Amino acid sequence: MLFALDGGIDLKKAILTVLVAMVLVALTGCSAAWPDFNNSGDIWPATAKYSNGYYESNKTFDFEQSVQGNGYFMTYMYAKAGNVAIKNYAHGSGSLNSEATLTYQSLNRSTHNAYSDYNDFDQDCIQFKEDVAMVYAPMRIAVGTGYYAANPLDYSSLLKEKTWVKNYLAGTSMHHEVEYAHALDKELEIVAKDKRNLTWDPELESVGYTQMKLVEDVTDGKAHIGVLQANDNFLNNADITDPDYGDTDTLNKLGNIRSAWDNPSIEIDEDYWGTYHIEKNMTLEVPYHLIQKSEDWLPCCFGGYLTLPTLAVKDLGLKGAKGVFDCTCFKAPTVAEFPRTYPVV
């Protein structure tokens, strides 16, 4: 991957196991590029991948959560739509008052008509909002009806919460983390968008938009904030106009993506130990516009050749074929060269 992803967390201890499982099942495996019909088992057959017609897939997911209580908590959330992804997880013991929403969309639309330019349009968006207040306290929790009901478990875990958002095709990463905190009061909003509009000659219009807004109070802990933006050549001359290679997973497997750490255009790394009030509003927008027009493979007299400039005719080696392509070598016959003969009866 363009950025190293953190490993998973044991969900067996999570209080919100059911909710987390629902999120993972609903969100894992969505792609912004044309679906891999040959391997995914999609109902759209592999033979129709570039056939005439229209294809559309629009995946949406809405998630709302409200949790208040005292004890030990551990939560995990991951969502990936095409080339944008977010991750959020937290754990600690004490009191928790949390409100969170997640909105997800992955839209793929393709129009492949025989007598017009093909068009592939992909739009992916993830929005995450969170308003959370945590206060650390050691806890003793009785579990079940057996041994641990009579011998409660001791939980003494300082507060931690980690959130990152990544826009892979744009080469953008934003990261926020709080560790070892005794109290945390935070409002967080994340928006990640990726849009690719490809019309074959081809012409590609793409934009990657990433935003993180943060207002928080950290008590006796550590706060980290990081931003990384890859430089212009991190795609390593990859042909992202090819709909098969428009997703970063495929480009990375082909070795077409360089590390974002290789001479990044933006790098921010901040750490705060102690008690702080922090406000951040960070936005990165990466537009991309590419036109790759090519001449007809075999220009002919009803267009193409007649409109080529003189230098192009010479460069393409077509000067000697001028009479063929501009139709001047053709003369309508006035007398039949091979007169029709009739058999003798």
Image (spheres, rainbow, N blue to C red):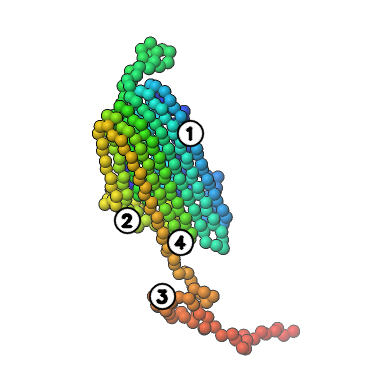
Q: Which residue is mark 3?
A: 312
- Alpha-carbon distance for marks 1 and 3? 60 Å
In the displayed orientation, state which residue is furthest to the top. Answer: 150
Residue drawn at 49 percent across, 55 percent down:
120
Q: Amino acid at mark 3?
A: Ala
N-terminal of the pair, mark 3 or mark 4, is 4
Q: Which residue is mark 1?
A: 64
- Alpha-carbon distance for marks 4 and 1? 41 Å
- Kindly state the secondary structure of the residue where label 1 is placed: strand
N-terminal of the pair, mark 2 or mark 1, is 1
Q: Which residue is mark 4?
A: 202
Q: Give the class, few, some or many, for how many residues have Cα within 10 Å of label 4's Cα (few <14, many ≥20).
A: some
N-terminal of the pair, mark 2 or mark 4, is 4
Quadrant for the N terminus in the image = top left
Q: Amino acid at mark 4?
A: Pro
Q: Amino acid at mark 1?
A: Glu
Q: Amino acid at mark 2?
A: Asn
Which of discs 2 and 1 lies nearer the camera? The answer is 1
- Alpha-carbon distance for marks 2 and 1? 39 Å
Q: Are marks 2 and 3 in contact (CB under 8 Å)?
A: no
In the displayed orientation, state which residue is furthest to the bottom. Answer: 335
Seen from the viewer's position, the closer of residues 202 and 128 is 128
Residue 83: percent from left, percent from top: 41, 47
Residue 248 visible, this orientation = no
Which of discs 1 and 3 lies nearer the camera? The answer is 1
- Alpha-carbon distance for marks 2 and 3? 30 Å
- Alpha-carbon distance for marks 2 and 4? 20 Å
Seen from the viewer's position, the closer of residues 77 and 255 is 77
